[in-house]
Amino acid sequence: MPTATKDAEIKFRTSDELKRQTRCVYDRWGLTLSEAFNLFMRKSVEVGGLPFDLRPEPSPVLTGRETLRPDPATGVTVLPAWMDAPEDEGLYDDLV
């Protein structure tokens, strides 16, 4: 598929903080803001609308005994995988 020239420019205004936070998100994926927004627009065209659901996801209900069980081998409580985000590396070490 031939590469289209990128000569159209889009400008919009946002807060410095939102821009910083957004840049941090896409930096983790190795994308610039321009690349990320191009992906967003391509996916929007592909699906014929917003490329994500706007309905809020229900928050998980945590019941400590069911969710945070100690590892039988070590006796140490292990976080569920969905709670163990790479950006939190070392965060929980201080709690032990």
Image (cartoon, rainbow, N blue to C red):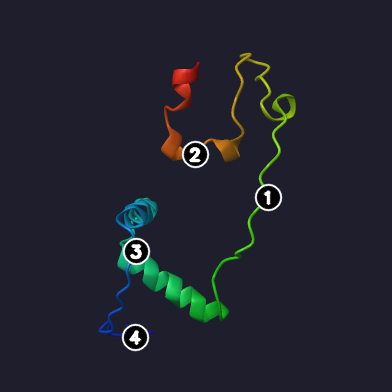
Residue at 34% x, 86% y is 2
**Residue 11 shown left or right of residue 84 in the figure:** left
Q: Residue at x 45, y 77 (%)?
A: 42
Instruction: Please tell me which residue is depicted at 27% across the width and 80% down the height of the picture.
Output: 9
Q: CA distance from mark 3 to mark 4?
A: 33 Å
**Which residue lies under the disc numbered 4?**
2
Give the x, y percent position of residue 78. Answer: 60, 25
Q: Quadrant of residue 36?
A: bottom left
Task: Check disc 2 and report the residue beneath it.
Answer: 85
At 66% from the left edge and 26% from the top edge, which residue is drawn?
68
Q: Residues within 10 Å of mark 4 (few under 14, many from 20)?
A: few
Up-down: is 34 above or below 84?
Answer: below
Front tag of 1 and 3: 3
Check disc 4 and report its element: helix, strand or loop.
loop
Mark linked to residue 14: 3
Q: Nearer the viewer, residue 10 or 87?
A: 10
Q: Amino acid at mark 2?
A: Ala
Q: Nearer the viewer, mark 1 or mark 2?
A: 1
Please tell me which of labels 2 and 4 falls first in the chain: 4
* SS assignment at label 1: loop
Whole-angstrom CA distance, mark 1 to mark 3, is 28 Å
Q: Describe residue 40's horizontal placement relative to residue 16 as left or right.
A: right
